[in-house]
Amino acid sequence: MNQITSLRLYETDYYQWTIEQVQALKERNFDNLDWDNIIEEIEALGRSEYNAVVSLLMRQLEHRLKIDYVSLPECRNKWKAEVIAFKDGMLRKLAPSMKPKLEKEFERIYNVASRIVETEYEISLPKQCPYSLTELLKKG
């Protein structure tokens, strides 16, 4: 398959494109690989994994804030269960190389999570995150 055919297939039948790219890789047929789109897909995969970790971390923060700052005792057990689920999902996707970027973005992640909870429950939350990133990323 030539590059033009591969590019058209990528745009019209992504699933078939993946099958053919995998086959070319297995056969070590590097001339038939759609390198530009393979590179783009691998970059997108990395971004997607990182964004999933950020989303699960943010949800964990939201629910921890609810547990600690929202006076609805009847909801606490549900929120605790949600923290467990979000943390487990995050830890399954977390890669060691993500930690430096998470550290850089942690303040922004907390600010978004706290704004969500403040808006939902009309409360004021601490401007600084009361939890450390290390604690939130810790297993258990």
Image (cartoon, rainbow, N blue to C red):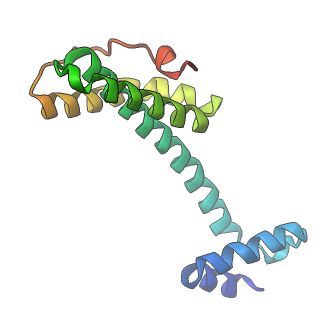
Say which quarter of the image contains residue 104. top left
Residue 118 at what x, y percent from top left?
16, 28
Residue 90 at what x, y percent from top left?
52, 34
Q: Against 100, is 135 above or below?
A: above
Viewer can see residue 118: yes
Q: Residue at x 53, y 48 (%)?
A: 47
Viewer can see residue 127: no
* Quadrant holding the C terminus: top right
Question: Count the marks: how many?
Answer: 0
Q: Residue at x 68, y 82 (%)?
A: 6
Q: Nearer the viewer, residue 81 or 134?
A: 81
Residue 51 at what x, y percent from top left?
47, 44
Q: Residue furthest front?
A: 74
Task: Indicate left or right for 27 with 87 as reference.
Answer: right
* Quadrant holding the N terminus: bottom right
Q: Nearer the viewer, residue 135 or 31?
A: 135
Q: Residue furthest right?
A: 27
Q: Residue at x 15, y 34 (%)?
A: 120
Q: Residue furthest left?
A: 122
Say which quarter of the image contains residue 107. top left
Residue 79 at what x, y percent from top left?
33, 28
Q: Residue at x 87, y 67 (%)?
A: 26
Q: Against 14, is 67 above or below?
A: above
Q: Against 30, is 72 above or below?
A: above
Task: Indicate left or right for 6 with 127 as reference.
Answer: right
Task: Indicate left or right for 97 with 51 as reference.
Answer: right
